[in-house]
Image: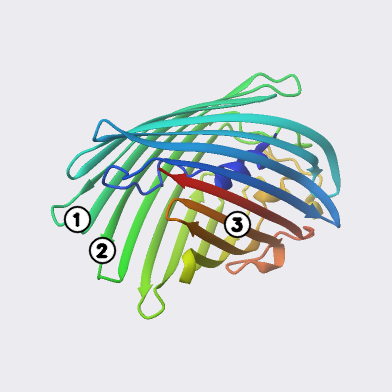
Amino acid sequence: MGLAGRAILAAALSMPILETARAETVPESAVISYKYLDYQESQLGEDRIGVKARAWSVLLPFAGDWSVQATYTKDAVSGASPRFWSKAAASMRDNREAKDISVTRYFSHDTLTIGASLSDENDYRSEGFSFAGTHSTEDKNTTFNYGFAVTNDDISSNGLQENKRKVDWALGITQILTSKDIVQLTVTDVQGKGYFTDPYKLFDLRPDSRHQNTAQVRWNHFIEGSDATLRLSYRYYTDSWSIKAHTLGVEYVQPLPGGWVLTPSLRVHDQSAAEFYVNPADFPWTATYSSLDQRLSAFGARTYGFKVSKTFDANWTVDVKYEKYLQRSGWRLFGQGSPDIDPFDAKMFQLGVSYRF
């Protein structure tokens, strides 16, 4: 599948276990859900990577104070992946199967969750283990969350036999400010060691370690009269490759009569380039490390989205979501974008169905 496909699916079909806010009480009912994703990239008027994925999940409470959640994902990736900036491409096709399971124990003011994951494709195998928990104060106005995860990846492509290992930590706090406002702060630390080079790109050689840090603030505000919720988020990212990124998100959740909910959204992203990213005008180069990967360049991006959901008989829920992603080097807000980078677009359609029983 390659690195792009894995990033897409992680964002669209799953929620990272370290960053997901968990319920503090046992779920009142079991839930079975299905999600379908259709993702397509385009550049220079041509289609690039396309992803079609399906995910099935189940959440089951049991034994009074326990719940188990399991997800199975199957996807197919095809298209043309740029190898030399956006000027040339190599056709590819791959399939992936992923399985995730977690078990949660609920206490009066705490939760503890243990999870495991496995992802398999032709040239990539990933195994993961995670532990997470929450602790609430006596009045339930403040909740602390923490998490730890280890991921081990085996890469076997183009005759390579390589390995990559990552250790993730997360700490967070959620605070109810008023009857209408809730704020959450989460910080994460990810340390990776091993093979980070993309074997499908020309002249790509990256450091064998990467240290990533993020800080994210979320604020939800309930709007009286319309029963709507405004969701704002800001995320700051930095890593040992000298990438610094800012992401601002806005969602407006509007319930309507008959079980309908409308959610328009906007995300604005800005990032600097990795220290070893090579601009087209600077080719050739003599540095030890180098990459022509446009995702490591300096650019700005916008994501426009709209989601519609409908609940039937308090048991069935159907949702449809469409997002359009636009990336331009000239859209940077905090500096200059990388020169001579062609515009990059992507569109994503999601369909979800869930049933409570």
What residue is shown with label 3? 320
User: Which comes before the other along the chain, label 2 or label 1?
Assistant: 1
Location of residue 255 in the rendering, given as x and y in whole percent from the top left corner: 46, 69
Quadrant showing the N terminus = top right
Location of residue 144 in the rendering, given as x and y in whole percent from the top left corner: 26, 49
Distance between the Cα atoms at labels 3 and 2? 30 Å
Location of residue 225 in the rendering, given as x and y in whole percent from the top left corner: 37, 81
Amino acid type assigned to the residue bearing label 2 in the image: Ile
Q: Nearer the viewer, residue 279 or 351?
A: 351
Quadrant of the image occupied by residue 109: top left
Amino acid type assigned to the residue bearing label 3 in the image: Val
What residue is shown with label 1? 140
Q: Which of 204 and 89 is in front in this view?
A: 89
Disc 3 secondary structure class: strand
What residue is shown with label 2? 176
Disc 1 secondary structure class: loop
Q: Residue at x 77, y 60 (%)?
A: 343
Q: Single out the mark in the foreground, 1 or 3.
A: 3
Amino acid type assigned to the residue bearing label 1 in the image: Lys
Q: Residue at x 79, y 59 (%)?
A: 340
